[in-house]
Image (tube, grey):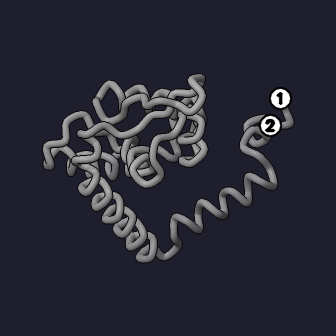
Amino acid sequence: MDLLDSNHWSDLHALLADLDRDIAALYTEAGIEGMRTRFVGPLIALHRFGPMTIRELAARRGVSHSAMSQTAAAMARAGFVESTAGDDGRTRPIGLTARSHEIMPFLVAEWRSTEAAVRQLDEELPYSMTRVVADLRALLAARSFAERLRPVDR
């Protein structure tokens, strides 16, 4: 088989997209316009810990500053966050809007429900996804993906 005809992990990507779509459908059913699944974690963090800079929020969520900056801008356009006054005038923390405070009970309940469902699925698997991820990380720690992409015989 020619590897150009292959997309070995396409089923995994499709599965994750399907799960994401099911979660997003909950927001639509609840009438929450403009909500994206990638917004929920940062919104809950802002709810739990108060306004934060993009850098602080990125660190808390374990993503890059660039990714969080893009997410924060999209959340602001959708009306879920707004800039707040910073301590020193150089920083502009973001905080929740009144709209976000209103829907927060739903978001928290959805997050808990999603985490419970994912954990249940993980337990039902003969070889859990958390184990797969840990094993993949161990293999990549021994030989990185970048190294694996560069065959010796080029």
Residue 46 visible somewhere in the drawing: yes
Label of residue 154 in the image: 1
Q: Is residue 101 left or right of residue 2?
A: left
Q: Position of residue 65 (x, y in %)?
A: 59, 32
Q: Is residue 151 left or right of residue 35?
A: right
Q: Nearer the viewer, residue 79 or 12?
A: 79
Pick out the residue farthest to the right: 152
Amino acid at dot 1: Arg
Q: Position of residue 82 (x, y in %)?
A: 37, 30
Q: Quadrant of the C terminus?
A: top right
Q: Nearer the viewer, residue 39 or 76?
A: 76
Q: Position of residue 27 (x, y in %)?
A: 21, 46
Identify the secondary structure beneath mark 1. loop
Residue under the image location 60 percent in, 23 percent down:
90
Pick out the residue farthest to the front: 88
Q: Quadrant of the N terminus?
A: top right
Q: Position of residue 127 (x, y in %)?
A: 53, 72
Q: Are marks 2 and 1 in contact (CB under 8 Å)?
A: yes
Q: Which residue is mark 2?
A: 151
Q: Is residue 25 left or right of residue 71?
A: left
Q: Nearer the viewer, residue 136 or 79?
A: 79
Residue under the image location 21 percent in, 51 percent down:
26
